[in-house]
Image (cartoon, rainbow, N blue to C red):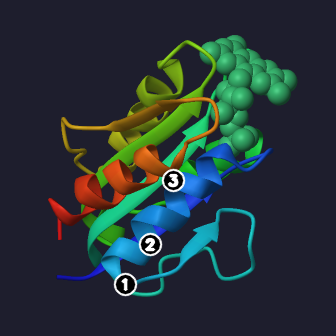
Amino acid sequence: MSCAVRYYSRTGNTKALADAIAEATGTRAISVDAADAAVPAPVDVLFIGGALYAYGIDSHLKGYLKSLKSHDAVEAVVFSTSWVSKHAIDLIKKGLEEAGIPTADDVLYVRSKPDADHLKEAAVFALRFV
Ligand SMILES: Cc1cc2nc3c(=O)[nH]c(=O)nc-3n(C[C@H](O)[C@H](O)[C@H](O)COP(=O)(O)O)c2cc1C
């Protein structure tokens, strides 16, 4: 089963989850503003994560979601970090819905900076989808 991991992270918290997911699934986590962020070939599972900033998601992630096509992934799995609110998950899911990519009901969410246990949890979570 093929997968890809994409994320946007300003201060590293969401990147830590992305890296744990990527390591568990044997791929590389790529920031959505990287030159190679486009999904090169359709994947079974696209893990996609972002954080909440002033009750919104970063414009880089918004733009990336808009660039996605329905054939890029069979299913997307969303992960996020924030201080309190899980609203980024809703916003990312909305972008995926607009792109025509179905999203898994289960999501991964951690408050602020993931610790070692959270990173283990992220790996276990990711392996359920691949
Ligand atoms: C400018 C700014 C605005 C934020 N706004 C919110 C917010 O509205 N609600 C919330 O729960 N967390 C908010 N946060 C907390 C971030 O979502 C949280 O620190 C997150 O883990 C950052 O992820 P990152 O390290 O991947 O960038 C904000 C953080 C910053 C720096």
Amino acid type of the residue that numbered disc 1 sits on in the rendered structure: Gly
Amino acid type of the residue that numbered disc 2 sits on in the rendered structure: Ala
Give residue 75's quadrant in the image: bottom left
Q: Is residue 58 above or below residue 66?
A: above
Q: Alpha carbon of mark 2 to alpha carbon of mark 3: how far?
A: 9 Å
Q: What secondary structure is found at the residue carrying circle 3? A: helix
What residue sits right under mark 1 in the picture?
26
Badge 3: residue crowd in 10 Å (few <14, some 14–19, many ≥20) = many
Q: Alpha carbon of mark 3 to alpha carbon of mark 1: how far?
A: 14 Å
- Residue in the foreground of this view, choosing between 23 and 62: 23
What residue sits right under mark 3 in the picture?
17
* Residue contact between numbered discs 2 and 1, judged by CB atoms under 8 Å: yes
Question: Which residue occupies 56% across, 33% down?
Answer: 81
Quadrant of the image containing the C terminus: bottom left
Give residue 7's quadrant in the image: bottom right
Q: What secondary structure is found at the residue carrying circle 1? A: loop
What residue sits right under mark 2 in the picture?
22
Q: Which label's residue is closer to the chain start, 3 or 1?
A: 3
Question: Which residue occupies 33% across, 49% down?
Answer: 121
Instruction: Please say whether residue 53 is visible from this viewpoint.
Output: no
- Residue in the foreground of this view, choosing between 83 and 67: 83
Q: In the orientation shown, which residue stands out farthest toward the right?
A: 11
Badge 2: residue crowd in 10 Å (few <14, some 14–19, many ≥20) = many
Tally the marks.
Answer: 3
- Residue in the foreground of this view, choosing between 79 and 71: 79
